[in-house]
Image: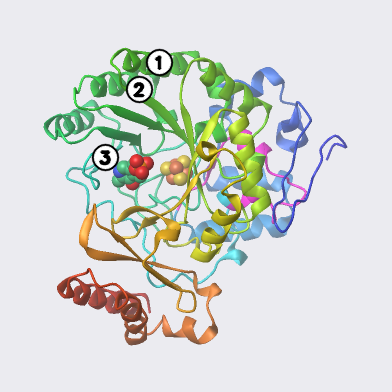
Amino acid sequence: MNVQEKTIEYGKNSQIHISINPNFWQLCKPFQQVSKDDFLSHRWQVKHTVYGFEAINTFLRSVASSDVVEQVLLGLRLAPMAVRLTPYILSRINWLNPIADPIRRQFIPLANEYEQDHPMLTLDSLGEQEDSPLPGLVHRYPNKALFLAQSHCPVYCRFCTRSYLVGQDTHTNKKVQYEKTIKHWKEIFKYIDSNREIEDLVVSGGDCYNLSPKMLEYIGNGLLEIPHLRRIRFATKGLAVDPTKILSDREWTDTLTRIVDDARKLNKHVAVHTHFNHPNEISWITQSAAKVLFERGITVRNQSVLIRDVNDNFDTMATLIKMLGDMNIQPYYVYQHDMVRGVENLRTDLSTNVNLEKRIRGITAGFYTPTFVTDCPCGGGKRVSCSYEYYNRSSGVSVYIAPSIKSDRAFLYFDPLVSLAPDIRKAWLNPDEAQELCNEALSKVNCISSEWKNSYLNSIASLVQLRN
Ligand SMILES: *Cc1c(COP(=O)(O)O)cnc(C)c1O
Ligand code: SF4
C-alpha cells in the first residue's frame, strides 16, 4: 500500500481508513493502470463490475491470499445473495487485511465466518409478500406504500432484507422476480390511484440506479400525476457504491433533477434515500456527487443497517454520521439487522442497538441524528428500537406492539444465538422450549388476542421443527 494511505484504528473493530490519495483505486492491483477519466466514468464502472462466481474468483486471486479465496468460494455456495460489486466499492476495501475489512464483510462472505441461524430466521422476515395486494407493491401502513419497481441493484449486499427477491438465484435461494415492464408499473399506478389514502411512496426494489433515465422518467411522471400522492422517495444505494454515475451519467442525474423540480412546482416532495453503512465507503468522489445533488436542491437521506463488526461501535457510527452531515445528507434511520437467513454473523443483539443510540444521541444536531429502528418481523412495521414492551436479554426475545398497524398482535425479535448462554441456545432448537421462551415474553404484553397468541406459538413450534 502507498505510504499516503493511512489506516487509523478508532476503538474496537472500527477499521476506519481515511484515504488521502486522490487516485486511491490504483492501490488495488486490478485497477492499478486505470486512469482517472476511466474510473470516473459510470459506463466503465458498469462494464467492469465483478459479477458472479467466475469473475469474483479471478478478481480475488489478484488481491487476496489463496486461503481467503478458498473461504470466499465456499462461502458463496451457502449464501442467499449473489455476488455483484462495482470497481468503486472493491477499491474501498483494504486488501492488505480483507478479513477485518468492514466493506468486505458487507459484500463478500467467508465460509469460516458462518454462524448457525436462529431457527426464527426466514428470507422474507418482514412478511412483505403477505402485505402485497399485488406483486411489486407492499401496502402495510395506512398512508404509505413501497413500490418494488424491479429486482436488481448495482451491488448485492449479503444482508439484504429482500433476499427473497433481489438479485440472481443462488445455490440456496430461488428468487421471486419482478420485471421492469410498463405493464407491471401501470398496474401499480392504478392501485395507488384508486387507494386515495396513499400519500407517501417509496420506490425501491432493487435499486433506482438500475432504472434507465427513460424508465425513471416514466415512473416519476406517472406518480406525479396521481393527485393524492404527496411524497415520493427514490431509493438507491448508488451514491455509496458508485457515486461516479451522478457525475458522469448526465442524462440520469438530469432526469432525477427534473422530477424533483416538477414535483416542487406541484407543492410535492421528491427525495433520494440512500444507504451508507461505513465511513470507508465515502471518498472525494462521493463528496463531489453529493455536492451536485445538494446544489440541485435534492434532499438526500440515509438509511444504515447496524452490522456486527462493521458499524456497531460508537467511533464508526459517530464518524459516519458526521461525514454524512458534512455532505448535507440527513442520517434518517439505523436499522436493527433484519432476521434474514444465512448472514447470522452480521446481526447484533438488540441491546447493542439500544446502547449505541444512547451514546449517539446528543453528539450533533437532532435533525442529523438517525432514529434507531427495528423493522418488526411479520409486518409490524418500523418501531423505535428502545420502545419495546419487554426485552429479556437472557432469552434474547424482545416484544413490540404496533397499534397503528396491527393492533391485536405483538411482534417478536430474537437476538442471535451466539449472544446467548449455551443452555438457552440449546433450548431454541427444541420446539417446546422455544415455545416457552416466546410465551414468557408474550405473557408480559396484555393487548394481544389469545387467539392470535395461540396460533403464533403453534407457528413457532412448527418452524423450529422444520429447521431441525
Ligand atoms: C419502510 C417502509 C415504508 C416507509 O416508512 P418510513 O418510516 O416512512 O420511512 C413504507 N412501506 C413499507 C412497507 C416499508 O417497509
Ligand atoms: S442495495 Fe438494498 S436492495 Fe440492493 S442488495 Fe443491498 S440492501 Fe438489498
Give the alpha-carbon distance from disc 3 to disc 2, as whole Å: 18 Å
Nearer to us of marks 3 and 2 is 3
Q: Is residue 409 above or below residue 87?
A: below
In the image, residue 57 lies at what x, y percent? 62, 48
Q: Nearer the viewer, residue 417 or 44?
A: 417
* Badge 2 element: helix
Residue 343 lies within the magenta run: no
Where the N terminus falls, by quadrant? top right
Residue 242 position by quadrant: top right
* 66 displayed left or right of 391: right
Q: Which disc, if any, is residue 367?
A: none
Ligand 1 near label 3 (Cβ, under 8 Å)? Answer: yes
Q: Which disc, if any, is residue 216?
A: 2
Instruction: Check disc 3 and give the amino acid type.
Output: Ala
Pointers 1 and 2 in contact (C-beta within 8 Å): yes
Instruction: Check disc 1 and give the amino acid type.
Output: Thr
Q: Earlier in the sequence, mark 3 or mark 2?
A: 3
Q: Nearer the viewer, residue 166 or 329?
A: 329
In the image, residue 362 lies at what x, y percent? 59, 46
Tell which quarter ligand 1 is in. Answer: top left
In the image, residue 347 lies at what x, y percent? 51, 61
